[in-house]
Image (tube, rainbow, N blue to C red):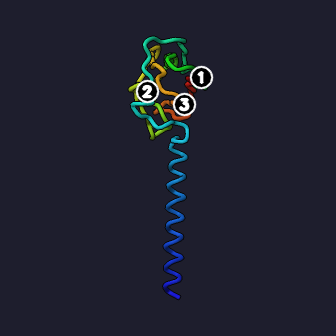
Amino acid sequence: MKKHSSLLVIAGALIAAGGIFLAAFHFSGNYLTPQKTAESTIKCSSTHVAHTVTFVDGKAEPEHTQASACDTIMFLNSDNQIRAIAFGVHDHHTPYDGVTETQLSYNKSFTITLNQIGIFTFHDHFQEETAGTFTVIN
């Protein structure tokens, strides 16, 4: 009987560990961000459409940007507080165009070239509900 109980405890622990792993993977945002490899980065000889995301009143406007490969996005801080713009979900930052996180004071901006295809998230590391997404198609 003890052997049977031990096997049940081990099986339960393995199932619980698998559930924790799947939950961590899901909530890390990896389901949104494609695997990044040197092969998945597009070399842009020129840029196309220039998009702008403005941080104002604690929100990203627009909250979602639809773009094509080799477009750009400029992130502009129009709030009176410093914004630490990061890619990926909060605490699981993933670099995009070589940028993992950039601090912006009032009226400052930075621009990335959209050189990876997929759906990507960004947020303010100081105020994680200030967030948005962008989709890059080929």
- The location of residue 5, given as percent across then percent down, is 52, 81
Type of residue at label 3? Gly
Q: Quadrant of the C terminus?
A: top right
The residue beneath circle 2 is 41
Answer above or below: position of 119 versus 65: below
Residue position for label 3 = 118
| Residue 58 seen | no
Q: Of callouts 2 and 3, which one flags the residue occurring earlier in the amino acid sequence?
A: 2
Asked whether residue 95 is in view, the answer is yes
Q: CA distance from mark 2 to mark 3?
A: 11 Å
Kind of residue at disc 1: Thr
Q: Quadrant of residue 38?
A: top left
Q: Is residue 86 left or right of residue 52?
A: left
Q: Reading the chain from its start, which is encountered first: label 2 or label 1?
A: 2
- Element on which disc 3 rests: strand
Q: Which residue position holds label 1?
A: 65
Q: Give me the residue at 51% from left, 41% from top.
A: 30
The numbered mark, 3 or 1, whose residue comes first in the sequence reads: 1
Amino acid at dot 2: Thr
Give the residue at x 48% y 35%.
88
Nearer the viewer's eye, disc 2 or disc 1? 2
Q: Residue at x 54, y 58 (%)?
A: 19
Q: Callout 1: few (<14), some (14-19), or many (20+) C-alpha neighbours within 10 Å?
A: some
Instruction: Give the side of residue 134 with respect to residue 38, left or right.
Output: right
Question: Percent position (x, y) of residue 66?
Answer: 60, 22
Please say if 18 is above or below 89: below
